[in-house]
Amino acid sequence: MKRIYSALLLLAVILPLVIIGEMPFALLIGVISMIAIKEVTDLYKFPILVKLLMFLGLLSVVYSNFEPSGIVLGLDYKVLSGFLLALTLPIILFQTAGKYNVKDSFEVIGFLLILGLGLNYLILIRNYDLIYFLFVILIPIITDIFAYTSGIMIGKHKATKLSPNKSWEGYIIGSIMGTFIMTVFYVVLIGNQTNLFIVIGLILALSIVGQLGDLFFSAIKRQFDIKDFSRLIPGHGGVVDRLDSIIFVALLFIMLMSYL
């Protein structure tokens, strides 16, 4: 039950800011990004300077060019160059002390790119259109709900060691139902002239990539031998645990939205 109560509380806090959009929603994403990067920095024993650069680097990407036109113009390259330099140069100071090495630097940059771009795109998509934002958010949520419930009910064939509780039956039914429900959502609420078969194919791709995002972050948790990134949200784990599939869907959606 605590999983349901936590979800309802999150919905009560987040939904009004999603509806309002603009700066209140952008500030919400900023808070979420700071919690997310805190969960990531807790995985490492980095010097405080590196952790500070990670916080600043993530914010710089999240808040880089989040006007709707940014969907076309893309990330500010000055920001991207700045944080790449900032997170590689500390190697000179700390590698000999064993506190921050080349491998750490690339892992940190990977985290910041995936989290930063994903959260930046959520702001972009919300500023572009509320319905499209709900479309992006609901695809992984509905897919996950049906994958979870069908996996419990009829799942017999384990899909991967990265997530032992997930089954092929759950993945397949999750994507089928996620695609069906979100196709209806698209036709009823967006309903432009895009060929229906193209819409179905793109939604299926978004549903599948959302599940791949969940597996990607499961691989990270397995590497660090943790169950969740934190215990912030009872029954759900941490913020990164809730963002995993949504971020991957947002990343692919930006690539595909001109076709929808």
Image: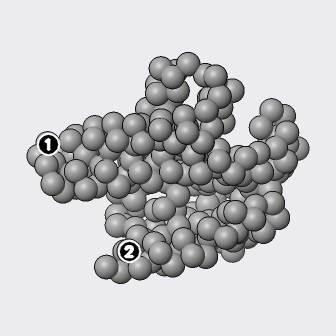
Residue appearing at x 63%, y 38% in the figure: 190
Residue appearing at x 39%, y 37% in the figure: 180
Residue that badge 2 annotates: 4
Three-letter residue code for mark 1: His
Residue appearing at x 38%, y 74% in the figure: 4
Q: In this view, does 115 lie to the left or right of 66?
A: left
Callout 2 secondary element: helix
Mark seen at residue 16: none
Residue appearing at x 27%, y 41% in the figure: 173
Judge the density around disc 1: few (<14), some (14-19), many (≥20) Cα neighbours within 10 Å. Answer: few
In this rendering, is residue 149 above or below 232?
above
Three-letter residue code for mark 2: Ile
Residue that badge 1 annotates: 157
Give percent across and percent down for residue 181.
42, 42
- Viewer-nearest residue: 189 or 224: 189
- Viewer-nearest residue: 26 or 228: 26
Tag 2–tag 1 contact (CB < 8 Å): no
Alpha carbons under labels 2 and 1: distance apart: 27 Å
- Viewer-nearest residue: 159 or 227: 159
Residue 51 shows in this picture: no
Give percent across and percent down for residue 259.
64, 24
In this rendering, is residue 118 above or below 242?
above
Give percent across and percent down for residue 148.
28, 55
Q: Which residue lies furthest to the right in this view?
A: 78
